[in-house]
Amino acid sequence: MRKYLITFLLSQDDKFYHEDTVGIEMEANDLKELFNLIGDVETDEITSSRIVRAVEGSGLVFDSYAPIVIGEFNEDGIPIIVWEDKDYRFNHESSNLH
């Protein structure tokens, strides 16, 4: 099993929290299985509750979430990006400029 760090973008009533993403770790054999786990209804409930716990106390309320970056942990325990939502990155990278 491989260990992944998935960064999710949260939203509430179609308002996206671009500054407040949340990351959770999941295990899967490969990216295909990981995407199946994220999209599976039963696992989705588990993922949703893990995200709720991750944002507890922050005041964030959300009704949907979507993965925007996936990193696979290397042998040193550092996540290396293996997938990212390029449309999201392209549409929002200018918002990161100061």
Image (spheres, rainbow, N blue to C red):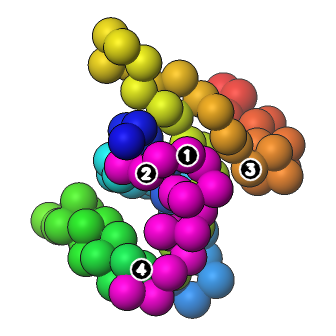
> Circles 1 and 2: CB distance less than 8 Å?
yes
Q: Residue at x 50, y 69 (%)?
A: 38
* Disc 1 element: loop
**Segment tinted magenta in the rendering:** 27-42
Tag 1 residue: 30
Tag 4 residue: 44
Callout 4: few (<14), some (14-19), or many (20+) C-alpha neighbours within 10 Å?
Answer: some
* Disc 4 element: helix
Callout 2: few (<14), some (14-19), or many (20+) C-alpha neighbours within 10 Å?
Answer: some
Q: Earlier in the sequence, mark 1 or mark 4?
A: 1
Q: Earlier in the sequence, mark 2 or mark 3?
A: 2
Determine if the magenta segment contains residue 83: no
- Image x and y of residue 8, in percent: 50, 57
Eye-nearest disc, 2 or 4: 2
Q: Residue at x 37, y 86 (%)?
A: 42
Q: In the shown orientation, is residue 15 left or right of residue 61?
A: right
